[in-house]
């Protein structure tokens, strides 16, 4: 039986998962969350005609160069103008303050001079009036943000400027991370001569948090079917992610344990590299389970391709099409029969164009190669060898970049 493609596998996973319940999230804490409902403005912004500069509120008709205007009162941000304004008047005004009714422009203070109780206009009227009309940013009732949009600091600024204190978002998924393997020791523990440190669990906890989920305290289970079954059944979470034990070895016991719990296995292996043994199940109680292979690159590439969209789906969102194109910095060999996701690094060519270099060693155990990478280069099954300058598909994980990338 042939294995599904990455897209086929992802489609069956997403079809089996529903968004979590909706609850209000404080606007300042909503970064990275998906909006569950459309958000509309409750008032106009700005709520009055506002000055864009420090200067003098005047009537355009009075503001010719050389004009002398009578100074009446002032308008400070946060307060109403403190005097009535009539034709021939100038009122002191500051950035963000309300224009007095009757004024329609601001002469910036660099272009006017106070002479006793008069203002002398010293420059020709500017092409800009330096007035931000009421509602020029948005009007009451206007849709500010749509359901399904992902919140970021810029969108948070928009909601906050409309006075919205909480945003309706689907709950952040609680993610149980369950690593299996007698060889694993948590960082900080004492590793025996035939043991290794568990790199996948901390990496996936960070990945989950980065994608809006809440990693639960991780569990490390021995290669024992009953212990694995008990850990899966007892995990308090919205999705379970197991690490390792996905392949065909005698001690790869996670699938048998989960089957024993009455789970439906919807994906068992994908036509891809790394990550071929990745699998997915729905437990008897409806909770999804993503089974990641244990090799760190396999686990993290599969997290990028499957866990990120699953976390988005649980939050009512959609990661959409994430592949872009970049040009190869150097030649690349022909691909084998499976989709290959090569760890690589983006750079710039002499003209500033984006180029990508795939690392020579793509062994899926190599954490050092993952750490040096900032992109995955996708090679389709049986893709022919390609030369420098040819376009390739790339997926940039949503990781923080630094100057070394
Ligand atoms: N005969 C076959 N052998 C293997 C196949 C196959 O098709 N036929 N598939 C290979 C592929 S591809 C992968 S990927 C691995 C997947 O193995 P498992 O998911 O069963 O994972 P383990 O055997 O438990 O571990 C694999 C490897 O990764 C290390 N590991 C596991 N967990 C962690 C962790 N949390 N942190 C760091 N490293 C971890 C583990 O020590 C092993 O070295 O199977 C191939 N074999
Ligand atoms: O996919 Mo395994 O993931 O090739 O090492």
Image: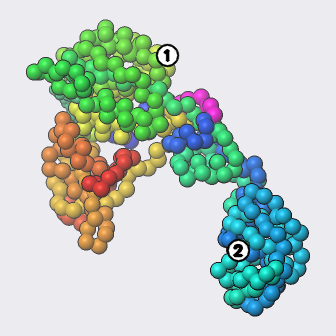
Q: Cβ of disc 2 within 8 Å of ligand 1? A: no
Q: Are marks 2 and 1 in contact (CB under 8 Å)?
A: no
Q: Who is closer to the viewer here, 223 or 384?
A: 223
Dot 2, crowdedness within 10 Å: few (<14), some or many (≥20)? many
Question: Image height check: is 72 above or below 359?
Answer: below
Q: Which residue is mark 2?
A: 55
Q: Which region is colored magenta? A: 17-24
Q: Quadrant of residue 120?
A: bottom right
Between marks 2 and 1, how big is the CA–CA gap?
67 Å
Q: Quadrant of residue 279?
A: top left
Report the image quarter containing ligand 1: top left
Q: Secondary structure at mark 1?
A: loop
Q: Who is closer to the viewer here, 62 or 386?
A: 62
Residue shown at the point (63%, 52%) measured from the top left: 158
Q: Quadrant of the N terminus?
A: top left
Marks 2 and 1: which is nearer the front? 2
Residue shown at the point (28%, 31%) measured from the top left: 200
The answer to whether residue 312 is left or right of residue 243 is right
């Amino acid at each position: 039986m042939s294995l599904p493609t990455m897209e086929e596998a992802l489609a069956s996973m997403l079809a089996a998962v529903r968004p979590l319940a909706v609850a209000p999230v404080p606007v300042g804490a909503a970064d990275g969350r998906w909006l569950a409902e459309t958000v509309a403005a409750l008032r106009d912004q700005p709520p009055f005609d506002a000055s864009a500069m420090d200067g003098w509120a005047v009537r355009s008709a009075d503001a010719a160069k050389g004009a002398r205007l009578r100074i009446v009162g002032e308008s400070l941000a946060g307060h109403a103008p403190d005097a009535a304004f009539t034709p021939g008047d100038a009122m002191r005004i500051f950035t963000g303050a309300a224009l007095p009714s009757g004024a329609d422009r601001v002469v910036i203070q660099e272009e006017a001079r106070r002479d006793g109780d008069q203002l002398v206009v010293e420059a020709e009227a500017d092409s800009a009036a330096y007035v931000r009309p009421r509602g020029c940013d948005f009007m009451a009732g206007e849709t500010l943000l749509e359901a399904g949009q992902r919140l970021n600091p810029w969108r948070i600024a928009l909601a906050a400027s409309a006075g919205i204190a909480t945003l309706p978002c689907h709950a952040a998924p609680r993610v149980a991370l369950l690593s299996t393997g007698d060889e694993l020791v948590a960082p900080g523990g004492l590793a025996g001569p035939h043991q290794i440190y568990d790199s996948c669990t901390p990496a996936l906890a960070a990945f989950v948090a980065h994608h809006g989920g809440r990693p639960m305290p991780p569990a490390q289970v021995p290669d024992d079917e009953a212990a694995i079954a008990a850990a899966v059944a007892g995990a308090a979470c919205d999705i379970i992610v197991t690490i390792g034990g996905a392949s065909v070895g005698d001690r790869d016991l996670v699938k048998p344990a989960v089957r024993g719990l009455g789970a439906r296995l919807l994906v068992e292996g994908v036509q891809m590299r790394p990550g071929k043994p990745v699998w997915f199940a729905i437990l008897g109680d409806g909770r999804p389970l993503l089974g990641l292979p244990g090799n760190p690159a396999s686990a993290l590439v599969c997290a990028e391709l499957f866990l990120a969209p699953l976390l988005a789906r649980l939050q009512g969102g959609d990661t959409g099409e994430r592949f872009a194109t970049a040009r190869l910095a150097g030649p690349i060999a022909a691909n084998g029969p499976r989709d290959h996701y090569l760890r690589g690094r983006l750079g710039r060519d002499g003209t500033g164009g984006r180029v990508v270099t795939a690392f020579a060693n793509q062994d899926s155990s190599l954490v050092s190669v993952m750490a040096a990478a900032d992109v995955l280069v996708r090679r389709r099954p049986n893709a022919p060898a390609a030369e420098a300058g040819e376009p390739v598909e790339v997926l940039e994980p949503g990781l923080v970049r630094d100057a070394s990338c």
